[in-house]
Amino acid sequence: MKALTIDAQTNSIKEVDIQMQANSVYTFFSSILIDEVSTLKDHIIYTDANALSEKKKAYFIGEQLLLGDALILAREDFNDSDVVIKKEELSSLIKDDVNEFYKKALNLLAKTDINLYRTFEVDKKGEAISLNLEWTLYTFNIADDATKEYFLNELGKSVEVKESVEAFIVKISQLAVNSIG
């Protein structure tokens, strides 16, 4: 099966042939903890779920934050298949200009066991909506400087006193949802 890989250190993209078996993705990352991100239309992006705690390099595909190396396959009806997106098109979507807010937040979060993509629920006018840490970081990144600084300071306090960082993220995400209206 044809796949694309992204080397996070160099942002280089390679086309590879892999034999898809039950453990292929786990073997690729040498990990049993894998994240699946479906940012690319009709594709699935696999990343190592340990990339945050291992302080792997951050980058974006479009607006989607990714950490560490990635394996990309096409996805149709929950089945992986040969990648469809071209290397050149994927390359044009990769941005490695991660700003200071993201760098500081990710550095703090690396000290925890939190996951970028694990969902949690908050309330929006009586309706439960699912969010994740990646959404929270994106939302606070587009906030004003004072709000960014507040987020980083409170996150730092939570990490320092070893409180539940996940509880802090849920609480701060709820505040963000409330402020959006």
Image (cartoon, grey):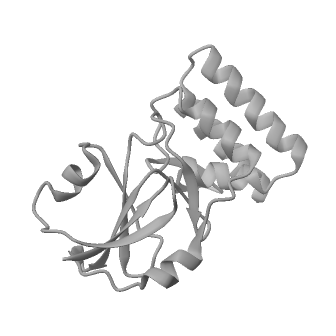
Residue farthest top in this picture: 161
Q: Nearer the viewer, residue 14 or 67?
A: 14
Q: Quadrant of residue 181?
A: bottom right
Q: Residue at x 50, y 27 (%)?
A: 112
Q: Position of residue 169 (x, y in %)?
A: 60, 38
Q: Is residue 7 left or right of residue 93?
A: left
- The residue nearer to you, when weighing 9 against 99, is 9
Q: How many marks?
A: 0
- Locate residue 70: give its quadrant: bottom left
Q: Quadrant of the N terminus?
A: bottom left
Residue at image location 59% in from the left, 71% down from the top:
62
Residue 74 located left or right of residue 54:
left
| Residue nearest the observer in this picture, 4 or 32 | 4
List x then y, in percent, for residue 55.
51, 37
Q: Is residue 22 left or right of residue 27?
A: left
Q: Is residue 50 left or right of residue 9?
A: left
Up the image or down, 104 lies above or below 163; here it is below
Q: Is residue 19 positioned above or below 54 on the image? A: below
**Residue drawn at point x = 17 percent, y = 58 percent:** 24
Give me the residue at 37% from left, 71% from top: 14
Residue 28, image x, y percentages? 24, 54
Question: Is 92 located above or below residue 161 in the figure?
Answer: below
